[in-house]
Amino acid sequence: MNIAVIGSNMVDLISYIEKMPKEGETLEAPDFEIGCGGKGANQAVAAAKMGSKVMMVTKVGDDLFANNTIQNLERYGIDTEFTNKVPGTSSGVAPIFVDQESKNRILIIKGANQHLLPEDVDRAAEKLKKCSLIVLQLEIPLPTIYHAIEFGNKHGIPVILNPAPARKDLDFEYVCKSDFFIPNESELEILTGMPVESEDQIQKAAMVLIEKGLKNVIVTMGSRGVMWVTKEKSQTVDSHKVAAIDTTGAGDAFIGCFAHYFVQNGDVLNAIKMATAFAALSVTKRGTQTSYPGIDEVEQFLKVRV
């Protein structure tokens, strides 16, 4: 197994809207789709679509969504041995609203994801020890995240932490033990309390996290590209200009693809460049996981861009 994703899964309930209704207002929306999502599952699928062998440690409910979620992961070749049902609990659900400018607003109901505990990491320990990378996000309980980081450190496994959705109560004693910290601009702003309007401001905010003890901060900046900040340097990789239709899951697309390429040879800059292309392609289609390209599409896309 190359990559272990310890994290969330959600059922995406996607409404395509012309504008958000005001209080008390009812509007007709032109379209609706149901899809499989959740930051953890999205990142696992992105890595799997690029060719990585991925295992997922996650929890689903015992409702009508559960089997479909498990089958969806397996469809992408993801190991679901440690994807377990929680009796009497709903699966995680994410109502998503996408407007005509392809911008999205998302609510999450964690459901069974709240029941992913440190003991679940321990139950998967023997298989986790064989992985080359652990990927984490914040849609599961913080004690589980901290335990997984400690597990990675103990067994010499690099850890990616995606601080999404951002939480101010993150314990940086644990967070700084992760190898890569990958927020977007809004998450960086929440975590540091600093403005992120310009690239200079983003760099300064990222440096605050580096000064706390983080090794690598990689900030995804949407159409402005990606900024990689370490104690020694700061480097920006430009985004690819595409006609965006739906930006939902683009950050997860980036992280999953980054994980895939980092595991190949440890080349961080190349992993960022490949992930930037992967994420750009993902926003040209509707949906989350269904919008993720295969490796052939990414390579063809980059050939045209050269």
Image: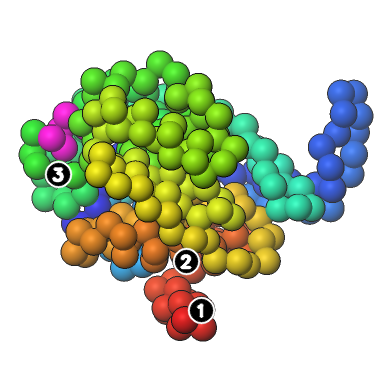
Mark 3 / mark 1, whichever is N-terminal: 3
User: Can residue 263 be seen from the camera position used here?
Assistant: yes
At x 87% / y 29%, what residue is drawn? 22
Q: Is residue 16 left or right of residue 24?
A: left
- Residue 252 x, y percent position in the rendering: 46, 49
> Quick one: label 1, few (<14), some, or many (20+) residues within 10 Å?
few
SS state under label 1: helix
The residue segment tinted magenta is 148-153
Q: CA distance from mark 3 to mark 1?
A: 34 Å
Quadrant where the image shows the N terminus? bottom left
Q: Residue 5's quadrant in the figure?
A: top left
Report the magenta stretch's main SS. Answer: helix
Q: Amino acid at mark 2?
A: Ala
Choose between 24 and 204: the one closer to the eye.
Answer: 204
- Residue 246 x, y percent position in the rendering: 65, 55
User: Can residue 57 be seen from the camera position used here?
Assistant: no
Q: Is residue 217 left or right of residue 2?
A: right
Q: Residue 123's quadrant in the figure?
A: top left
Q: Which residue is mark 3?
A: 157
- Residue 264 x, y percent position in the rendering: 21, 64
**Pointers 1 and 2 in contact (C-beta within 8 Å):** yes
Q: Amino acid at mark 3?
A: Ile
Q: Which residue is mark 1?
A: 305
At x 36% / y 28%, what residue is drawn? 208
Q: CA distance from mark 1 to mark 2?
A: 10 Å
Residue 218 versus residue 91 in the image, above or below: below
**Pointers 3 and 1 in contact (C-beta within 8 Å):** no
Q: Residue 136's quadrant in the figure?
A: top left
Choose between 44 and 99: the one closer to the eye.
Answer: 99
Q: Nearer the viewer, mark 2 or mark 3?
A: 2
